[in-house]
Image (cartoon, helix red, strand yellow):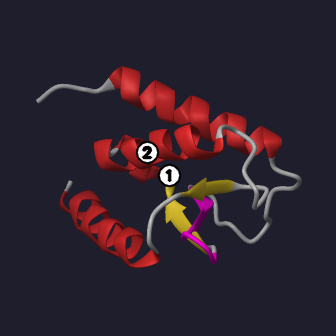
Amino acid sequence: MGIRLPGMIQAKQILRRSLLRANHLATDVPKGHLAVYVGEAQKKRFVVPVSYLNQPIFQDLLSQSEEEFGFDHPMGGLTIPCKEDTFIDLTSRLNGLCMRK
């Protein structure tokens, strides 16, 4: 079992740049979590644990977000370009993975 340090560093850089560009940080996000906007046409806000940043599949979503939006996110926060149902399925799986560790 290896550590994917370069991927984690890249995920943190993407997140940091996104947050720096945000107009304001939401105060209703609990410590250890981050807010993301998900959807294709209509965006929905989700609050997810930062532990997801360690997961390769979530890092892939962040890379896709960077490719599609750069760091100028239209919602003023991190926007993930996938269907809401897909994101919910993914986070359910990640939640199960994180709980088992």
Above or below 59: residue 81: below
The part of the image, by quadrant, that contains residue 7 is top left
Mark 2, secondary structure of its residue: helix
In space, the residues marked 2 and 1 are separated at their CA atoms by 6 Å
Q: Where is residue 53 shown, x and y percent of the image?
A: 43, 45
Residue named by callout 2? 53
Overall secondary structure of the magenta section: strand
- Name the residue: 63% across, 78% down: 42
Residue 14 within the magenta-colored segment of the rendering: no
- Position of 29 with respect to 80 (left or right) is right
Q: Quadrant of the C terminus?
A: bottom left
Q: Quadrant of the N terminus?
A: top left
Mark 1, secondary structure of its residue: helix
- Name the residue: 81% across, 56% down: 25
Q: Which residues are magenta?
A: 33-42
- Name the residue: 42% across, 50% down: 51
Q: Where is residue 88 shown, x and y percent of the image?
A: 38, 75
Above or below 81: residue 3: above
Residue named by callout 1? 50
- Name the residue: 67% across, 36% down: 16
Amino acid under disc 1:
Val
Along the line of sight, the residue nearer the viewer: 69 or 22: 69
- Position of 54 with respect to 18 (left or right) is left
Above or below 85: residue 38: above
Q: Where is residue 22 shown, x and y percent of the image?
A: 81, 49
Of all residues, the one furthest to the left in this rendering is 1
Amino acid under disc 2:
Leu
Q: Where is residue 96 shown, x and y percent of the image?
A: 23, 67
Answer yes or no: do the residues labelled 2 and 1 have beta carbons within 8 Å? yes
- Position of 83 with respect to 98 (left or right) is right
